[in-house]
Image: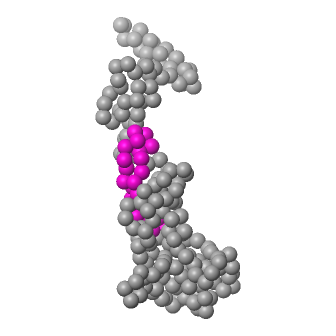
């Protein structure tokens, strides 16, 4: 069995940074190092959107050094809550993020003696975000013609939306259905 070490986050009442000591890892190849704690990440930049993070992000990380490959295998599991905007109706949405990622990190590319986990925690939070957040699965959105929030109100009286939106690709099917209905009415004697 591979050895295991728990790296605590508190040292004499002071909060330690979430990181791994690369020298200690190199000295014990294959030994699993762990760290767990909360990281304050006030906001995330995601595809041009500033996402507000509610409270600290809880993170659990484990890592071990592979000497033959000169790499660290890092697993980071993040849990947190973020405030977003519904992609259809623009209502506020609170989204729970729960994401685990495994990465290969090459220590030679890291400046300094520590593998800092904050960039990986932020990346895990970004990867856990939904691409199109919704306030509810059946959100009707905002009418592009009159601006009504269709979850709360019907189309406005002055709405100039097309009454029937026809997809030109379905015109042949519409003709067939029309012919079938006419044939059905004739056979029924109407």
**Of 82 and 15, which appears nearest the observer?**
15
Q: Residue at x 55, y 88 (%)?
A: 31
21 above or below 146? Answer: below
Residue 182 screen position, x and y as percent: 44, 12
119 above or below 178? Answer: below
**Of 120 and 71, which appears nearest the observer?**
120
Q: Which residue is drawn at 40% across and 29% down?
A: 147
**Of 180 and 26, which appears nearest the observer?**
26
For residue 152, side relative to residue 82 (left or right): left
- Residue 99 is covered by the magenta coloring: yes
Dominant SS of magenta comes to strand
91 above or below 152? Answer: below
Q: Which residue is drawn at 41% across and 73% down?
A: 38
Task: Say which quadrant the C terminus sits in.
Answer: top left
Q: In which quarter of the image is residue 116?
A: bottom right
- Residue 110 is covered by the magenta coloring: no
Give the number of callouts.
0
Residue 86 screen position, x and y as percent: 41, 45
Q: In which quarter of the image is residue 41?
A: bottom left
Residue 158 screen position, x and y as percent: 38, 19
Q: Give the range drawn in magenta.
A: 78-100
């Amino acid at each position: 069995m591979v050895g295991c070490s728990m790296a605590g986050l508190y040292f004499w009442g002071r909060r330690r940074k979430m990181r791994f000591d690369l020298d200690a890892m190199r000295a014990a190849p294959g030994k699993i190092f762990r760290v767990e704690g909360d990281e304050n990440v006030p906001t995330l930049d995601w595809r041009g959107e500033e996402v507000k993070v509610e409270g600290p992000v809880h993170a659990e990380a484990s890592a071990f050094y592979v000497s033959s490959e000169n790499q660290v295998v890092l697993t980071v599991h993040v849990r947190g809550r973020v405030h977003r905007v519904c992609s259809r109706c623009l209502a506020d949405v609170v989204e729970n993020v729960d994401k685990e990622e495994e990465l290969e990190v090459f220590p030679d590319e890291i400046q300094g003696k520590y593998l800092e986990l904050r960039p990986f925690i932020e990346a895990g939070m970004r990867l856990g975000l939904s691409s199109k957040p919704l306030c509810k699965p059946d959100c009707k959105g905002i009418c592009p013609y009159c601006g009504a929030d269709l979850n709360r109100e019907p189309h406005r009286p002055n709405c100039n939306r097309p009454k029937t939106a026809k997809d030109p690709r379905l015109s042949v099917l519409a003709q067939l259905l029309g012919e079938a209905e006419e044939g059905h009415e004739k056979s029924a004697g109407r």
